Every structure is written in C-alpha cells, then in structure tokens.
Image (cartoon, rainbow, N blue to C red):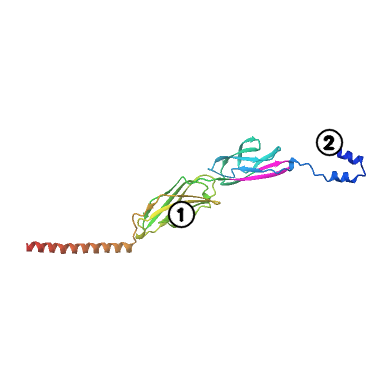
Amino acid sequence: MESVLFSSLLLVAAYPRSGSLQHEWMQSPPMPSRASMPFLVRLSPEVEAVPPGGSVWLNCSHSCPLPVRSSLRTQLRQGKTLNGSGWVSYQLLDVRAWNSKVRCVVTCAGETREATARITAYKRPRSVIMEPPVLVGHKYTLRCYVIHVFPVGFLVVSLRKGGQVVYFESLERFTGSDLANVTLTYVIRAGPNDLWQPLTCHARLNLDGLVVRSSSAPVMFTMIALNPASKALASASIVALVGILLAVGAVYVRKYQAVQTQL
C-alpha cells in the first residue's frame, strides 16, 4: 500500500500541470479493509431450562476473521471458560433465579455486537396428592399437597369436583428461591348429588409463556353429611318404608294361612 501511494505521489510531482492524472488518482476506489467486513455473533442454546441450583454451559461463537474481545455479561455466577477458534464456552453455576438474561458481547476491529440467551430455573412438582375428604360436622375438609415445586410464586393450585373448579389459589406472594412443599386446605359442603363425584387437585406453573401442569389421582365422596332436616326426613322415610314392608309381609302371611286352612 505504501509503495502504490508513493508512486502516485511521484507521478503528481513529476507532472504538476496534468490535472487528468491527479483527478484519476483521487477518484480511484479505496482498497477493501478486513475491519469493515460484517460478522455475526451467536449464543447457544438461546433458551435453556435447568433445575434450581443446577449449572449450564453456553457457547458464544462469532464469524470475525480477526482477533476479538469476548465477554459474558450476566448476574449469574460464572465458572470455567473454554476457548477455541471462533468460539468461547462459559459455565454458569448454581442457577436459582427462575428467569435470567445472558449477553455475549464480541468486539471485532472496533465494532461491537452481542447475542442473548435466556436461562430459566424451575422444578415440576415431584407429586400432587389429594387426600380423601374428611367429614367434620356437616362439612368436608379437602387437603392437597404439592411436593417439591419451584418457583412457588408462579404456582396456581386448584380443586375440582367432577371436572368443575370449586376453589383455586395463586401463590404469587411467595418469593423464596428454594424448592418448597405447598399444602392447600379447603372446606366444602356436599349433598346427595355429590356422592361418588371425583375430586382432583391441579398444580399449574405459569412461567412467562411456559405452562407446566401436574394433577393428582382422583378421590371420591363416599358418604354424604346430612343436616338435621335431611336426617329427620331420612328417618321418616326409613320408618315409612319399614311400615310398608311390614304391612305387605302381613298380607302375604294371612294369604298363606288362608291357603293352608283350605287345604
């Protein structure tokens, strides 16, 4: 480049009145520069889910043909780093935030570009257990257990009777960063139409577009609590039924005795 430029200057100096040569040299296109070449940056995987407390590797690759400066910007704790031609791998440790944004920043010949990834930490409930209803007085106590779930603050627990939601609760007030067990208790009345109706408990994690669902095995109402009026009606019905059976039995006994007398 220096030799070409020097020769051009010599020509201009040798022919100071030749405007055509000077104009031709000034309009010549510039030599292409490698520094102006576009380059790409990619961070993979772009979305990764890990259990709370787990670790993950992210690979930052680029297409810059020149030496680069690369860094990973995140609030997560970093571990080991591996390097190769056109790539750098970063280890992230003890991921406990349910949603973290990670940026890989690459500078190539003075130009900086970046790529992003999202790390989510969640744990599907290990189990959802619905206890059989417990009769207390004239009401039933329903109890559901959601075992080892995270993050609790994004959990919604619902109770269903025959497929219909009878109660639900959102646990957004909980902000802990550890696995937790959740117990939901609800008191309900049940009538004769509820006998043998299936009761189920459902846990749903709403994670910014990712929905994780779990449910319990069904349990049944096997007996129905009656209020005093219903008990009195049931007793009267039983007495009436017994009276009818006794009357019918007496009629058959008399008929039988009459037949025996004729014989």
User: In screen coordinates, is 261 left or right of 220?
Assistant: left
For numbered disc 1, what is the local secondary structure?
strand
Q: Earlier in the sequence, mark 2 or mark 1?
A: 2
Q: Which residues are magenta?
A: 104-118
Query: Is 82 contained in the magenta span?
Result: no
Q: Residues within 10 Å of mark 1 (few under 14, many from 20)?
A: some
Q: Amino acid at mark 2?
A: Ser
- Residue labelled with disc 2: 3
Q: Nearer the viewer, residue 251 or 137?
A: 251
Q: Could you give the CA–CA distance between mark 2 and mark 1, rounded to whole angstroms? A: 81 Å
User: In screen coordinates, is 17 left or right of 206?
Assistant: right
Q: Amino acid at mark 1?
A: Ser
Q: Is residue 87 above or below residue 217?
A: above
- Residue labelled with disc 1: 158
Q: Nearer the viewer, residue 181 or 207?
A: 207
Percent position (x, y) of residue 130? 41, 50
Q: Nearer the viewer, residue 46 or 147?
A: 46
Percent position (x, y) of residue 94? 57, 40
Looking at the image, which residue is at 64% across and 38% down? 87
Q: Is residue 233 above or below residue 117?
A: below
Looking at the image, which residue is at 22% across and 62% down? 242
For numbered disc 2, what is the local secondary structure?
helix
